[in-house]
Image: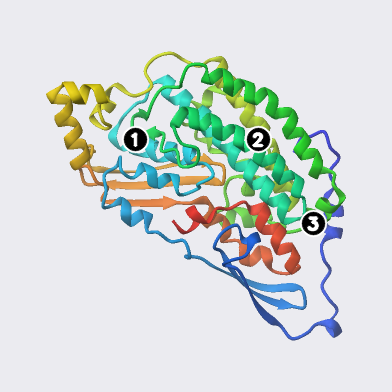
Amino acid sequence: MATDYNFPDSAARAAAAAPEAPAEFQTEKMSLAMGPSHPSTHGVLRLQLELDGETVTSADPVLGYLHRGDEKIAENMTYNQFVPYTDRLDYLAPLANNMAYAIAVERLAKLEVPARCQAIRVLTAEMARISAHLMGLGAFGLDVGAWTVLLYSLEEREKLYKLFEELTGARFTTSYTRIGGVTRDVPEGWLGRVGAFCDQFLPILEEILKLLTRNKIFMDRTVGVGVISRADALAYGLTGPNLRGSGVALDLRKDKPYSGYEQYEFDVPVGTTGDCYDRYLVRGEEMRQSVRIIRQVLARFPDGPWYAPDARRIFAPPKDKILTSMEELIQNFMLVTEGPQIPPGEVYFEAENPKGVLGFFIVSRGGGVPYRLKIRSPSFCNLSILPKACQGILISDVVALLGSMDFVMGECDR
């Protein structure tokens, strides 16, 4: 990928890989449970490792400690009621989750949202991408011993959370997007504050990356470690930065644009080797590209409504209308009790979330409740490669590998 640094070539990375121990030094294998309560597993993930000395010979991921049954819950509540549950998938980027789910239902209901709504969604999704990558980068740095990176990242993320709170009323689980629009329009002066954040963020981002990119200790922990080949990344269904780190330039914002992404210019960073170092570089560059997209959205932010004209049959009327109009009161009552009436059919929509491709498959038999809902969570698919990626690396390198994968168990277990 194009940067200002001189990165090690493939030969240097291969030389950095741990050699196999001679036969006379091979010992009896040991079984070790890493997690589910372990700081480097980034949640309730359990890895059942088989070790030969300090070398991992096999790894078996054990999932399900955070299973909540989101897909079955969706079949017992209205389309609108399920929006807050999408916050709890990748809870580091709830604005992006809301957006993916809303677009899926809108395509099922054949709703077209106006340009202003699309711009708001792109803006918030890219802000959520930066926020999620900052947390992933800080946690990754902490995993390999770089404490300062986490402090820088949390400070910048806090600035984003203040902007989220101004827009949505919440910092963490925002529930901002609605089917057919968004909860409310952007407040006065908010776009200017987003632009000011971008102006001050880029220099700080460069400072954060300089702490790691040519850091000898960080490079020793990541270069040539946890290599995922292009073929393996495709075969195991990896998406997002983990796939692009292996050299596959797949980004749905470019390849299957939605919500007006085709209007904006940005680059898709890719790696060359697919090791932990490449995945770090890709996420760093993606934050630069997200700022680039945000600035384009701010420069051409459209006027007009922030919800589709037909969306009033889906989300609740304004409070003042409910209190003064019998028709609006009846509509609100029907939406709450029966849900929005979605025509029969089925749809699958996937969006480019910070962790990878988040997809929703929805089957409707009419009425206000989905008949079936299936979530394609990127963290679950990305973790499927762990048994192969862990094989042959040192146990200390498992920590670096998990940090570079940047997963969230909330969407993995669902």
CA–CA distance in space, label 3 to label 2 = 25 Å
Say which of 222 and 184 sits in front: 184
| Residue 252 appearing in the image | yes
Q: Is residue 4 above or below residue 196?
A: below
Disc 1 and disc 3 in contact, CB within 8 angstroms = no
Count of numbered labels shown in the rendering: 3
From the viewer's perspective, tell me whether residue 273 is left or right of residue 216: left
Q: Earlier in the sequence, mark 1 or mark 3?
A: 1
Name the residue beneath numbered marker 1: 107
Q: Quadrant of residue 186?
A: top left
Q: Amino acid at mark 1?
A: Arg
- Compare marks 2 and 1 and give the one earlier in the sequence: 1
Element at label 2: helix
Q: What quarter of the picture does the N terminus occupy?
A: top right
- Residue 221 marker: 3
Helix, strand or loop at disc 3? helix
Q: Residue at x 77, y 78 (%)?
A: 53
